[in-house]
Image: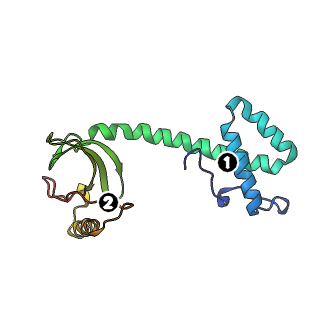
């Protein structure tokens, strides 16, 4: 969750019957939360004091959301800082697969890593995303699933669905998708 997202009602503290969480109340909490996030940190406490003068439980709810958002933002920054060395050490960066040279890692999931690659043969300029199965997961079952995903993409043709451009293999025999 980024600092602009609003946590779900389930993540809010316990409330009394006087502050029952109705859809209207949740909407008001989200509005005040958004306004508080837009405030300069020096002005935020006076803004929240004004809110609390009229509705103490609303102020409390918003303060709780702000604390959660700030905590998550700090965690995201820490995660980004710790992930930076991984980008530098990624052995795929700079490698060529077919006519494309991998320039950077875009993301990594449970089954594969996605890279940004640029056409390297100077025939024309083009950038693509290349999805490569994680080497440690190259079991026959996962390779089969990955190849089925590639085949499914090859059959699809819709403006809102990614297009499969190529599907050869890496030097290690892993089937990339781009």
Instruction: Name the image colouring.
Output: rainbow
Residue 35: quarter of image: top right
26 up-or-down from 139: above or below: above
Q: In the picture provided, is 39 more to the left or to the right than 139?
A: right
First along the sequence among labels 2 and 1: 1
Residue at 14% across / 54% down in the picture? Answer: 172
Image coords of residue 13 (percent x, y)? 72, 55
Q: Secondary structure under badge 2?
A: loop
Check the picture and name the quadrant holding the C terminus: bottom left
Residue found at the very far top of the displayed protein: 42
Residue at 75% across / 35% down in the picture? Answer: 45
168 up-or-down from 50: above or below: below
Between 93 and 130, the residue placed more toward the observer is 130
Q: In the picture provided, is 54 more to the left or to the right than 26?
A: right
Q: Which residue is mark 1?
A: 65
Near mark 1 (Cα within 10 A), the count class, few <14, some 14-19 or many ≥20, is: many
Image coords of residue 162 (percent x, y)? 33, 59
Q: Which residue is mark 2?
A: 111
Q: Secondary structure under badge 1?
A: helix
């Amino acid at each position: 969750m980024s600092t602009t997202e609003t946590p779900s009602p389930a993540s809010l503290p316990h409330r009394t019957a006087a502050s029952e969480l109705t859809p209207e109340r949740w909407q008001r909490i989200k509005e005040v939360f958004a306004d508080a996030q837009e405030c300069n940190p020096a002005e935020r406490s006076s803004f929240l004091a004004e809110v609390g003068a009229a509705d103490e439980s609303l102020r409390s709810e918003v303060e709780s959301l702000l604390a959660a958002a700030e905590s998550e933002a700090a965690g995201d920054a820490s995660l980004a800082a710790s992930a930076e060395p991984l980008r530098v050490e990624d052995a795929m960066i700079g490698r060529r697969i077919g006519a494309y040279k991998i320039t950077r890692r875009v993301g990594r999931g449970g089954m594969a890593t996605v890279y940004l690659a640029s056409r390297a043969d100077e025939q024309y300029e083009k950038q693509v995303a290349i999805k490569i199965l994680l080497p440690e997961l190259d079991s026959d079952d996962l390779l089969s699933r990955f190849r089925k995903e590639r085949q499914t993409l090859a059959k699809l043709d819709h403006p809102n669905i990614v297009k499969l451009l190529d599907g050869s293999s890496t030097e290690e025999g892993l089937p990339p998708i781009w």
